[in-house]
């Protein structure tokens, strides 16, 4: 949702008490089912399904223009009861000739009968006439039959109860049901005339059909672009009209698949007919529109890469010669990577982001962070990977010693894919953990290190399009990206536009919002190791046809800077290195906005703001996913795509609170024992949640970020606490739970990371501890009614095991550790002010200047 107005996040550091700690226990929550009178409810669903079945007959009898043949399918929308999920997997039939198939799942805020906002699900399903009949049979069984359990015992539960009980209504889909863009891009207002990217399904006789649809659109006043994108199952056109105009088209819904906001692509800079002089004009225009204000204390992004050609006109103000470093003087500091460079392109994205976005507007561009470059790699003189840990420590120490007054983010975009650690720490990843925790420096300074996850190579591997995405799922994230403390960045893509006039017959490999072909995963890692990547950002796409791949389709990559600025100026650049550069830019902007926050907090805000795309979720919801599906989601995409606006700002109806504290997990008392936990009583908009929002859904989101002290010398890796110094986690009080009961629940747990007691939880978290509690950053969320959430401001941060506790001879048991806690409350009701009631309870907010 848009963040309006932009308000600073609030600090809640002091709202806690120290308590003695022991372990928590958990229980498993079943799928929530809405209470229904099965006869009344089932009969209503039957009537709605019969009306849809009748629509098939009406459709068959309805006269159509010549040569138009309708599909034997309709778009049907299932709408859930307020605050209850739908059993999405039961609405999908996965075979070659499905009778019903899920096309779209949305969670939305709506007003109920008394004007209060609540959340519900809308699921668009393409159904054949036979599919409707199948649902009618199942509803009849729901009304008349009971479920027989696995032991053959007849229960008192209705058959198909989980499928039907939470369905409030079933109806034909509307235009808005087809909007498939990102959550931050809202469906246009009904009367606004805008450009739409309209995706049509390819069907029998679709060429004639599409001509009729387009003629119908022209008759109602729509403007249609002459450009056409051809895909195996879709044809895409740009249409300029209002939502009202599109809805009035009688033929549009007959083969409509999706509606999106049109993409900006880099044709105006990288197109075949764009010569150097024209590129120079774009360069000069951007130079004229760029504002920069750097000083001796500015935030810097330190690039650990192949060097940077800092004389590129767009880099000169941000990277002076004195901030260029190299591991070997004989290497020099320039970018020596072939084919346009690597470090220079990384620098461009770390400063400006995708240049398409800044050059396609006339607005001023503000860049208030600078760059450093430490050349750690030369393609003609590679280092032995065993020394990369020490090299990286040196590479981080030199800039800090040279410019100690600057805050910085390190961005490492060189990885090693020759080893297969499967998540197990290496010397290099351990060095990353050590640097981030501050152990390399005296005095100790924690550092934010962003690391690219490492790429999958389709071009040189002999792979075909049929290998996507299995090839990515079987490709392990590269060393040192298994580092606990690093913010590891993978790649996804929304770039799927190909100019068929230039690249005839080529199609994008990855779907819109899906895994970039460059993304590697941690699916093959042993379960005790962290979920990586932590986040994903734009990494671009590949084009393919029946003959193979091509990587020169410029519209499928972000646009950055070419090291040869005297000939090319710009170059397409993406993959996980580009994604890491975009993350570094985001981190620098947050650090510039909140200069007093810890780096653990910067990392937490980025992860806290992340969301999964509909494509990543695969037509499901996190709540309804199985254990294996949740693990797969996290190990492919981390916590999703971070949103800068949410990371930077709160709003009246989107409140984010930050706590930065230190805790002593263990203490020596004859033996080493657990010592303390923090019990938060967070300032809370209790009256607004209870009285104004009431039954409306509100999302509570919690992210915990801390850095571990690595112990790679110990080879007992079967339990992760032999590598990490400590572990922390969080719990929140249940609705109407007594404080004393909550504290007893915190104190009654069993020990151990792999203890079965951590598998479930009596708190309705979406991911749950078994999935989220890997590594040193943990995030989860609960969707609850405002009334339930009104009293849920009691939260515990508590320790779990680690080598500080188990390795007595190392004398680290009395160590105090830092952590950052980010808690947010979010409602779609823009009239709800949950921010100011909390602000009044807090004397000091985060300074943002």
Image (tube, grey):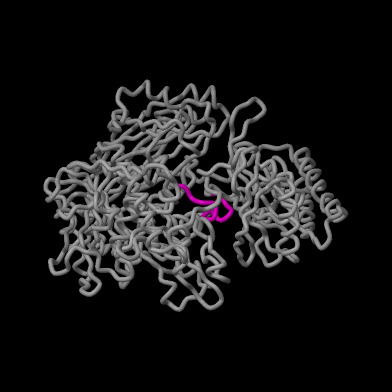
Instruction: Residue 10 in the image: state x and y as whole percent.
Output: 35, 30
Q: Quadrant of residue 635?
A: bottom left
* Of residues 17 and 808, the one drawn nearer to the viewer in this rendering: 17
The secondary structure making up most of the magenta span is loop
Q: Is residue 797 left or right of residue 113?
A: left
- For image coordinates 46% across by 66% down, the residue present is 272
Instruction: Residue 684 in the image: state x and y as whole percent.
Output: 42, 26
* Of residues 215 and 42, the one drawn nearer to the viewer in this rendering: 215
- For image coordinates 22% across by 49% down, the residue present is 437
Q: Residue furthest front?
A: 277
629 is higher (above) or lower (below) than 14: below
Q: Quadrant of residue 343?
A: bottom left
264 is higher (above) or lower (below) than 229: above
553 is higher (above) or lower (below) than 848: below
Residue 822 seen in this snapshot: yes
Instruction: Residue 323 in the image: state x and y as whole percent.
Output: 17, 53
- For image coordinates 37% across by 49% down, the residue present is 285
Instruction: Residue 440 in the image: state x and y as whole percent.
Output: 15, 53
Residue 479 seen in this snapshot: no
Q: Is residue 568 left or right of residue 463?
A: left
Q: How many marks?
A: 0
Can you say which quadrant of the picture contains the C terminus? top left
What are the residue bounds of the magenta stretch? 611-621
* Of residues 60 and 77, the one drawn nearer to the viewer in this rendering: 60
Residue 478 covered by magenta stretch: no
- For image coordinates 22% across by 72% down, the residue present is 382
Q: Is residue 66 left or right of residue 433?
A: right
């Amino acid at each position: 949702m848009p963040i309006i107005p932009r308000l600073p996040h609030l600090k809640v550091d002091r709202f806690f008490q120290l308590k003695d700690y022991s372990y928590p226990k958990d229980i498993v929550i079943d799928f929530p089912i809405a209470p229904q009178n099965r006869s009344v409810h089932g009969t209503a669903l039957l009537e709605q399904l019969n009306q849809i079945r009748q629509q098939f007959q009406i459709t068959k009898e309805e006269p159509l223009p010549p040569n138009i043949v309708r599909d034997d399918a309709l778009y049907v929308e299932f709408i859930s009861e307020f605050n209850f999920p739908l059993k999405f997997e039961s609405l999908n039939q996965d075979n070659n000739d499905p009778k019903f198939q899920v096309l779209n799942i949305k969670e939305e805020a709506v007003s109920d009968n008394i004007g209060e906002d609540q959340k519900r699900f809308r699921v668009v399903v393409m159904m054949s006439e036979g599919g409707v009949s199948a649902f009618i049979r199942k509803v009849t069984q729901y009304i008349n039959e009971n479920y027989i359990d696995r032991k053959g015992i007849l229960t008192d539960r209705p058959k198909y109860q989980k499928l039907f009980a939470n369905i409030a209504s079933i109806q034909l889909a509307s235009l808005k049901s087809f909007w498939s863009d990102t959550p931050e891009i809202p469906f246009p207002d009904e009367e606004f005339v805008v450009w739409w990217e309209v995706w049509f399904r390819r069907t029998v006789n679709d060429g004639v059909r599409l001509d009729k649809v387009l003629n119908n659109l022209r008759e109602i006043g729509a403007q249609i672009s002459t450009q056409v994108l051809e895909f195996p199952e879709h044809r895409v056109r740009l249409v300029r009209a209002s939502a009202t105009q599109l809805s009035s088209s009688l033929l549009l819904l007959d083969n409509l698949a999706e509606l999106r906001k049109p993409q900006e692509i880099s044709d105006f800079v990288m197109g075949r007919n764009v010569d150097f002089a024209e590129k120079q004009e774009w360069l000069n225009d951007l130079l004229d529109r760029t504002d920069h204000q750097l000083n001796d204390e500015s935030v810097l992004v330190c690039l650990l890469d192949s060097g940077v050609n800092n004389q590129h006109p767009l880099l000169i103000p941000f990277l002076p010669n004195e901030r260029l470093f190299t591991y070997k003087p004989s290497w020099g500091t320039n970018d020596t990577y072939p084919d346009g460079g690597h470090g220079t392109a990384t620098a461009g994205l770390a400063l400006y982001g995708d240049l398409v976005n800044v050059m396609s507007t006339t607005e001023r561009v503000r860049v208030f962070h600078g760059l450093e470059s430490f050349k750690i790699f030369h393609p003609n003189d590679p280092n032995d990977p065993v020394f990369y840990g020490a090299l990286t420590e040196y590479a981080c120490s030199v800039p800090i010693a040279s410019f100690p007054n600057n805050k910085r983010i390190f961005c490492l975009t060189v990885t090693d894919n020759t080893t297969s650690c499967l998540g197990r720490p290496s010397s290099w990843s351990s060095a990353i953990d050590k640097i981030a925790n501050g152990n390399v420096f005296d005095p100790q300074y924690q550092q934010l290190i962003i690391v690219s996850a490492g790429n999958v190579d389709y071009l040189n591997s002999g792979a075909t399009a049929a290998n996507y995405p299995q090839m990515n799922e079987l490709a392990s994230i590269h060393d040192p990206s298994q580092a606990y403390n690093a913010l590891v960045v993978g790649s996804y893509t929304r770039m799927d536009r190909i100019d068929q006039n230039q690249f005839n017959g080529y199609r994008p490999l990855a779907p819109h919002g899906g895994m970039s072909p460059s993304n590697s995963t941690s699916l093959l890692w042993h379960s005790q190791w962290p979920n990586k990547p932590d986040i994903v950002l734009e990494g671009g796409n590949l084009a393919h046809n029946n003959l193979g791949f091509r990587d020169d389709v410029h519209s499928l990559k972000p646009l950055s800077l070419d090291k040869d600025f005297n000939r090319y100026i710009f170059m397409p650049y993406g993959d996980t290195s580009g994604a890491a550069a975009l993350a570094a830019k985001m981190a620098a902007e947050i650090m510039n906005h909140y200069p007093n926050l810890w780096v653990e907090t910067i990392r937490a805000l980025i992860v806290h703001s992340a969301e999964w795309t509909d494509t990543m979720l695969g037509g499901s919801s996190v709540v309804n996913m199985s254990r294996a599906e949740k693990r797969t989601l996290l190990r492919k995409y981390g916590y999703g795509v971070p949103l800068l606006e949410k990371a930077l700002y709160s709003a009246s109806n989107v409140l984010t609170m930050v706590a930065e504290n230190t805790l002593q997990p263990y203490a020596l008392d004859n033996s080493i024992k657990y010592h303390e936990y923090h019990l938060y009583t967070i300032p809370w908009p209790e009256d607004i949640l209870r009285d104004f929002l009431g039954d409306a859904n509100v999302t509570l989101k919690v992210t915990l970020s801390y850095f571990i002290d690595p112990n790679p010398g110990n080879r007992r890796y079967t339990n992760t606490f032999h590598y990490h110094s400590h572990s922390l986690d969080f719990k929140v009080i249940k609705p109407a739970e007594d404080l004393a009961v909550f504290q007893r629940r915190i104190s009654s747990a069993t020990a151990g990371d792999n203890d079965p007691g951590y598998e479930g939880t009596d708190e309705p978290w979406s991911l749950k501890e078994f999935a989220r509690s890997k590594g040193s950053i943990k995030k989860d969320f609960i969707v609850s009614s405002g009334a339930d959430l009104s009293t849920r401001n009691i939260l515990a941060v508590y320790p779990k095991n680690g080598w500080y506790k188990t390795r007595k001879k190392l004398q680290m048991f009395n160590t105090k550790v830092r952590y950052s806690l980010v808690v947010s409350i979010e409602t779609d009701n823009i009239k709800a002010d949950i921010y100011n009631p909390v602000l009044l309870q807090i004397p000091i907010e985060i300074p943002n200047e």
